[in-house]
Image: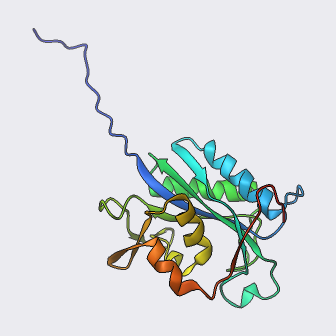
Amino acid sequence: MPFDDVAVVVRRRRDVPVVIAVGANLPTDDGNDPARTVRAAARGLHRVRGLRAVRLSPLYTSAPLGGPAVAGQPDYVNGVVLARTSLAPATLLARLLRLEEEHGRTRQVRWGARTLDLDLVQYGDPLAGTDVRSATTDLTLPHPRASERAFVLRPWLDLDPDAHLRTGRDVRAVRDLIPSLVDQELHPLEEGTSR
């Protein structure tokens, strides 16, 4: 019997793991110190529609890295957020940039001090071959310097001891990348400590 009032709709919902680096080294206009801002950003990520299972790593402090703009900057408070998302990479990036703006982030100097920095480090699972690789002016995945940043790798490893990151054509265990970064000092931020 034919039906002309019935429709079948198939929706595919991608749900992939994502890694987001979070850091800050300036107070916000409303007086939040960097540690408080990082924690507030993690709570903000819980409210992003299409992002779920949001977990914030323990926080660390570290000296700024980058170009000449880092001279004289205060130390950073850094952590990593692991989550799952159904959002497309560009959409997720747009939500991260909006959250940065809500916390007073301005982009005047590359590697300059900031109230909040949210970097999309990895989208998908490189071990399963589902990670997205992108090299556009708007989005580079995986993050091109993540493998060189102890302040990304150490907190990530705290949350996921089996974490892996694509580095060029290879996929490497995060724990194997850390020993080459011993010159980058990290100091655990005690729970409840503001800085």
Q: Is 62 placed above or below 78 here?
A: below
Residue 79 occupies quadrant: bottom right
Q: Residue at x 52, y 51 (%)?
A: 83
| Residue 175 as seen in the image, left or right of residue 158 | left
Q: In front: 123, or 176?
A: 176
Q: Is 68 placed above or below 53 here?
A: below
| Residue 82 as seen in the image, left or right of residue 39 | left
Q: Residue furthest bottom?
A: 68
Q: In front: 185, or 126?
A: 185
Colouring convention used in this rendered image of the protein: rainbow
| Residue 93 as seen in the image, left or right of residue 27 | left
Residue 77 occupies quadrant: bottom right
Q: Is residue 175 visible?
A: yes
Q: Residue at x 73, y 81 (%)?
A: 63
Q: Quarter holding the C terminus?
A: bottom right
Position of residue 16 measured from the top left corner of the image (x, y, whole percent) = 41, 51
Position of residue 71 measured from the top left corner of the image (x, y, whole percent) = 78, 88
Q: Is residue 136 visible?
A: no
Q: Is 16 placed above or below 186 here?
A: above
Q: Residue at x 53, y 55 (%)?
A: 82
